[in-house]
Image (tube, rainbow, N blue to C red):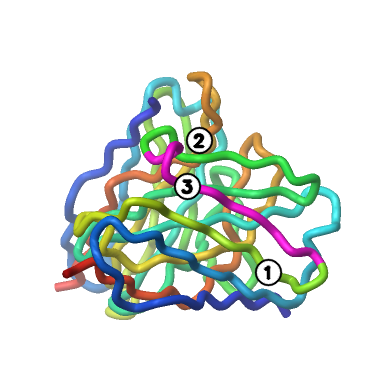
Amino acid sequence: QITLKESGPTLVKPTQTLTLTCTFSGFSLSTSGVGVGWIRQPPGKALEWLALIYWNDDKSYSPFLKRRLTITKDTFKNQVVLTLTNLDPVDTATYYCAHNVGPYYGSYFDYWGQGTLVTVSS
Amino acid sequence: SYVLTQPPSVSLAPGQTARITCGGNNIGSKSVHWYQQKPGQAPVLVVYDDSDRPSGIPERFSGSNSGNTATLTISRVEAGDEADYYCQVWDSSSDHLNWVFGGGTKLTVL
């Protein structure tokens, strides 16, 4: 049974750095073809893909946020960490991590965490 | 970057057939996936690889993809199908590798 859960601060100030952790179970990030991605959703708006990391440490980032994002994995802890720098109120969103069935071509997200709402406000 | 276009809303009565479209340049050459998101909940995969269903998803949910349009079809719509639906593809047409979502379609069951 695959599960994922996001954790991190619920309120951050503008210009600060956001660090979110995805803790998962039921699969290993050392297994070929496996990936974990981050997707966010501002209140009342659509889903937006942010970043993804694969079992072989290949990483991809949204071209719109690439300079502000970093994704890393800890295979032994079964965790994936996302950092987003220089926060702005427009970064207020629910942030999801999700298991990716890949790699790359045609890949999709078959299991999602419950999401964590992050508010950026002074 | 690659853009997916969905109608903002679709409304119909119970028992009818809902068709939610997802437009994109030559989308027929890509694998399209669909997610259902109910209020306050995480998205759930309902169709992958254009027309396959994950286990536990009713046969009423089906998909097709050709040309510049992919379609999610929900037969015999029920009140419990009321949700937002998002299409998604993987794109490498630019220098970046991208997982792209459509803008979402709100399905209302009257």
Direction from residue A83 to residue B11 in the image, left or right = left
- Mark 3, residues whose alpha carbon is within 10 Å: few (<14), some, or many (≥20)? many
Q: Are marks 2 and 1 on the same chain?
A: no
Residue B74 quadrant: bottom left
Segment tinted magenta in the rendering? A65-75
Q: Nearer the viewer, mark 2 or mark 3?
A: 3
Classify mark 3: helix, strand or loop.
strand
Residue B77 lies in the magenta-colored region: no
Give the residue pinned by disc 2: B98
Badge 3: chain ID: A
Instruction: Name the secondary structure under disc 2.
Output: strand
Residue B88 at x, y percent in the picture: 45, 45
Q: Which residue is mark 3?
A: A69
Q: Measure the alpha-carbon separation of dots 1 and 3.
A: 17 Å
Chain at tag 2: B
Image quadrant where one finds the C terminus of chain A: bottom left
Q: Nearer the viewer, mark 2 or mark 1?
A: 1
Classify A30 as above or below A23.
above
Q: Which mark is residue A79?
A: 1
Dot 2: within a 10 Å radius of its alpha carbon, few (fewer than 14), some, or many (20 or more) residues?
many
Q: Quadrant of the N terminus of chain A?
A: bottom right
What amino acid type should be assigned to the residue bearing mark 1?
A: Gln
What residue is shown at x 78% (from left), y 69% (from top)?
A27
Give the Cα distance between marks 2 and 3: 14 Å
Residue A67 is situated, as x and y percent measured from the top left of the image, at 43, 37
> Which residue occupies the foreground of this view, B107 or B60?
B107
Nearer-N-terminus badge (1/3): 3
Mark 2 and 3 residues: CB-CB less than 8 Å, in contact? no
Q: Could you confirm whether marks 1 and 3 are on the same chain?
A: yes
Q: Which amino acid lies under the numbered mark 3 shown in the image of this protein? A: Leu
Q: Nearer the viewer, residue A94 or A118?
A: A118
